[in-house]
Image: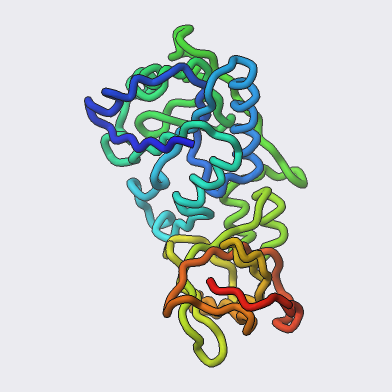
Amino acid sequence: MKVKYLNYSGEDLDGINPVPKVLALGFFDGVHLGHQRVINTAKQIAKEKHLPLAVMTFNHHPCEIFKSANDLSMKYLSSLEEKIRLMGNLGVNILYVVNFDLKFANLAQNTFVDKYIVGLNAKHVVAGFDYTFGKFGAGNMGSLSSLSNNRFKVTTVDQLSSRKEKISSTRIRKLIKLGKISQADKLLGHSYQIDGRIYQSVNGLFHFLVDNPKLQLPVGGNYIGRLANDINVEVPVSINEAEQIFLDLPTSIVLNSFSQAVSIDLVRENLAISAVKPTLQSQVI
């Protein structure tokens, strides 16, 4: 998968020489089942048209630019690096990461369409029913169809629900915050992953420092996490009220340095630390 970073300027698309493509639009925080429905719809259209599948997302949420009292505590379900990995797993050919700044936020609707859709040579655009664009987010899927002027086709994907409630990033953040990891993972369609570094033992446990301070963490408690760096072993994870994370690593796992980068997939919650007893030969991470 090719990843291309775009900034809003008169030279954004110069030299890109974009090929015709199917383009899915969205922020896609967490790349949950609702997002996957949008991307898979675009993927099927791309297959039928024999075109590459592209996705356009942003480097951060719009609320980071237009901060209000409610937005100051904005938390993410995935880092940009994790989002890129998940997009690759879904078979995306090209990922456009747009720098969402004030210039981009103030684009007129027609400018966004001309520059970022027609300019990227999208022949078919796919997005969720609630996708908005342009200044003040005034553009919607209806106006996108109107502004296409027969230059590209538009497909709107209806909402995906679970238990009669929309599957959304907001809903999943709330579940994770409450420590309901199993429920969150079902709506994500994958395990909730936390990237960070493991530091040497503290009182018999290992301190795990999260890479992204804006990542949504669960409420304090005991969880089961799976080390995702090709080790695939489940370990007890403890989170305290200060959002500090500690791992109870088996003696079979040895750090190869004072601190080691690793990812943890949270897979279950509220289990006793003694519930998992890995039996592996010594592994270095």
Q: Residue at x 58, y 17 (%)?
A: 50
Residue 171, percent from left and from top = 62, 52
Residue 234 visible (yes or no):
yes
Choose between 193 and 104: the one closer to the eye: 193
Q: Residue at x 23, y 30 (%)?
A: 9
Q: Quadrant of residue 214?
A: bottom left
Q: Residue at x 46, y 16 (%)?
A: 20
In the figure, 238 relative to 129: above or below?
Answer: below
Q: Quadrant of residue 161?
A: top right
- Is 240 drawn above or below residue 3 in the view shown? below
Q: Does residue 212 appear to the left or right of 101 in the view shown?
A: right
**Front residue (pair 278, 127):** 278
Q: Would residue 244 be visible to someone looking at this image? A: no
Number of numbered callouts drawn = 0
Residue furthest front as drawn: 281
At a point 48% along the width and 40% down the height, the residue shown is 27
Q: Position of residue 35 (x, y in %)?
A: 60, 39
Q: Is residue 179 above or below residue 167?
A: below
Q: Where residue 78 sits: x, y (%)?
A: 51, 53
Residue, far top: 150
Q: How is the image coloured?
A: rainbow
The answer to whether residue 92 is above or below residue 226 is above
Front-lying residue, 269 or 94: 94
Residue that sits furthest to the left in the current view: 10
